[in-house]
Amino acid sequence: MSINVLVTGAGGAAGVAVIRSLLRRADLTVFAADMDGWASGLYLVPAAQRRIVPPGAGSDFVPALAALVEADSLDLVISTVDVELITLSERREELAPAVLAAPCADTLNYALDKLSLARQCESTGLVPRTEAAGADANRVDWEFPVFAKPRRGAGSRGVRVVPDRAALEALPLDEDLIVQDLLPGEEYSVDVISDTTQHVIAAVPRTRTRVDSGVSIAGRTVHDPELEEAATRIAEAIGLVGVANVQLRRNRQGKAVLLEVNPRFPGALPLTIAAGVDIPSLVVDLFLGKSMPERLEFRELATVRFLEDVFIDPAEVLVSEHAAHQDD
Ligand SMILES: Nc1ncnc2c1ncn2[C@@H]1O[C@H](COP(=O)(O)OP(=O)(O)O)[C@@H](O)[C@H]1O
Ligand SMILES: [Mg+2]
C-alpha cells in the first residue's frame, strides 16, 4: 500500500526540491500544496494530487490541512514554509492520524529568536557574544565594529554594521535588535538531519558562493570536520529532530561560529541531495518510524542553477484566492 505524503510550499525552491526527491520513491504517493495556483511544484505531481491551501499565517490553515488529511488519507505532512511551521508544530495533534514531519515547538522557537538561540547554545563555545541592543549591549567592552540585526529577523532585513560606540548607543530601541561580535570571515550553511534520539545522521556544509535575492544560486559542498562538528553541536543544543540549516561564519580568529538556525528545508537542497544525503527521503523514513542510518557521508560537489520553463494547458492552472509571498 502506498504511503500518502503532502508537501506544502510547492512554489518555493525547497518545496520543489522535496517533491522531486520524494517522486523518486515508488512507495510514496506525493500530494503537492500551495496557496497560489501558479506555484510551479504543483505541476510536478499528477492533477489529482494538487491542492490549494489557505495562507499559513491564517486561522483556517490548520483545519484546512486536517481536512486534507482526512480526504486524502494522508500519512505524513511535510511543510517547507517558515510561517506555517510554528503553528503546525504547536497544533500537530490536530493533523492526526497523519504525522507532521517537523521539529518540536521548542526547537522552532529557539530558531525564531536569535537571542534565545544564542543563550541556548552558549555552552557549545560556538556563539559570538550576543546582547540585546540598549543597556545590555552598551555595557559591553566590544571590539568595534560590531554587528546588529533584528532578534526575530529573516532574509537579512534590518541587518547593519555598527562602526563605533556612538553608533551603538544611537541604535533604535523600537526594532528589537541584538548586537553581536562582527564575524568578518567566510559564511557556510550546514544542512543537518537528526534522528528521533537527536543524534545527528549527517551534517553537510556548503558555501553560498552566489546569492540572488537571498536564494543561493551557486555553491559547493565542503569537507571540513570543524564545520560538521560545529553544526552537530548546535543541532544537539537545540534538540533537533528532523532537518535544519545551521548557518556559520568565521570570526576574527578564523573559528566558525553560529550565525543562526533555519529549522526547515533549505532552497539549496538539491546540492545536498546530489552530494549523497537525500534529506527529504530520510525525513520521511524518520517520521514514519523506520530505522535510520547511523551516519551518512557526502561528497564534494559544486552547483550552478538556472530557471526551467514548464508548459501546461491554461485550463489546468488551479484557481486560488492568494498569490505567493513575493519576498522569498
Ligand atoms: N555577527 C555577524 N557578523 C557579520 N555578519 C553578520 C553577522 N550576523 C549576520 N551577518 C550577516 O547578515 C546576514 C543575515 O544574518 P542572519 O543571522 O543569517 O539572519 P537572517 O538570515 O535571519 O536575516 C548573514 O547572512 C550575514 O551575511
Ligand atoms: Mg540567515
Image (tube, rainbow, N blue to C red):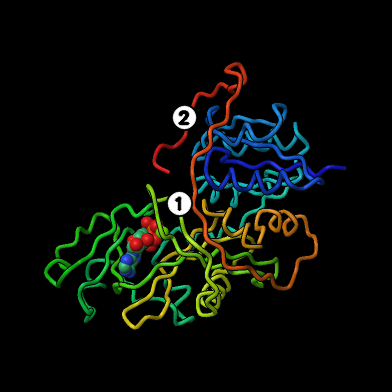
- Residue located farthest toward the left when viewing the structure as drawn: 166
Q: What element carries label 2?
A: loop
Q: Does the residue labelled 2 lie within 8 Å of ligand 1?
A: no
Residue 293 locus on image (x, y percent) = 75, 69
Note whether 90 is above or below 59 in the view shown. below
Tell me which residue sits at (53%, 58%) in the image.
263
Relative to 40, 158 lies left or right? left
Which corner quadrant holds the N terminus? top right
Q: Which of 135 and 123 is in front in this view?
A: 123
Which corner quadrant holds the C terminus? top left
Which quadrant of the structure image shows residue 198?
Answer: bottom right
Residue 60 locus on image (x, y percent) = 56, 33
Count residues near mark 1 (Cα–Cα under 10 Å), then give few for <14, some for 14-19, many for 20+. Answer: some
Question: If the picture is divided into quarters, which one holds ligand 2?
Answer: bottom left
Tell me which residue sits at (14%, 66%) in the image.
167
**Label 2 – label 1 distance at C-alpha:** 24 Å
Q: Which mark is residue 323?
A: 2
Marker count (numbered): 2
Q: Which amino acid does label 2 sit on?
A: Ala
Residue 87 locus on image (x, y percent) = 55, 47
Q: Which of 316 and 302 is in front in this view?
A: 302
Q: What residue type is labelled 1?
A: Ile
Looking at the rendered image, the disc whose residue lies closer to the viewer, 2 or 1, is: 1
Tell me which residue sits at (69%, 43%) in the image.
95
Q: Residue 217 carries which label?
A: 1
Which quadrant of the structure image shows residue 48?
Answer: top right
